[in-house]
Amino acid sequence: MIPALLLILQTSAMNYPVLPAAEFSAARVVPELLVSDIRKSLHFWCGLCGFSIAYDRPEDRFAYLDKHGSQVMLEEYGHGRNWITGPLEAPLGRGINLQIEVPAITPIVDALRGAGWPLYMEPEEKWYRAGTTEVGVQQFLVQDPDGYLIRYSAGLGRRDIQAEA
């Protein structure tokens, strides 16, 4: 890699929070998203949505991110080892949304709106049946720079199933 480009990537990553190694523990399932521009993706995931960099490999344009135990790996396609199973056409990740549990959705919504980032679905309160109870969440949907659909969700608790009106 060109040393100047490596320096740009390292400098851009240094602007985002770095998770201390002692606080990091890898999840058992972690999606790895191929992205078109790691800098734009880091701005979205870290700058707007509050993820921290657990570790990165700037020479591979790769970053492993964490937010309260929710984790995602980002790798710019065309660099490093990419396992591409079909054409990469926008929006990427069709047919899937990644649910990320957070303590509150409002700080993320405010940051996205402040940056002029469009929401795919406005915040809502939703109750889902789970056996004999309902689980409540506040949630919203947003697409990352490559079109991956992200659902941020904050828990509201459980309740008895409400009768249909």
Image (cartoon, rainbow, N blue to C red):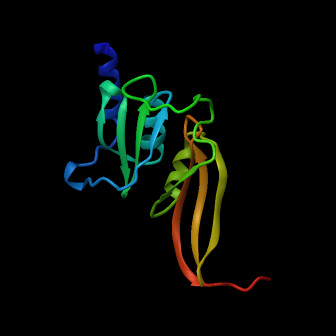
Nearest the camera: 153 or 106? 153
User: Outermost residue toward the front?
Assistant: 85
Task: Classify the position of the N terminus by image quarter.
Answer: top left
Number of numbered discs on residues: 0
Image x and y of residue 66, in percent: 36, 50
Nearest the camera: 38 or 26? 26
Describe residue 6's horizontal placement relative to residue 156 as left or right.
left
- Tell me: residue 159, above or below residue 114: below
Image x and y of residue 57, in percent: 29, 31
User: Outermost residue toward the right?
Assistant: 165
Image x and y of residue 164, in percent: 77, 82
Describe residue 159's horizontal placement relative to residue 44 as left or right.
right
Residue at horizontal 35%, vertical 37%?
63
Task: Classify the position of the C terminus by image quarter.
Answer: bottom right
Image x and y of residue 34, in percent: 47, 34
Q: Residue 23: which quarter of the image?
A: bottom left
- Tell me: residue 161, above or below residue 28: below
Q: Residue 145: which quarter of the image?
A: top right
Residue at horizontal 23%, vertical 49%?
20
Nearest the camera: 116 or 22? 22
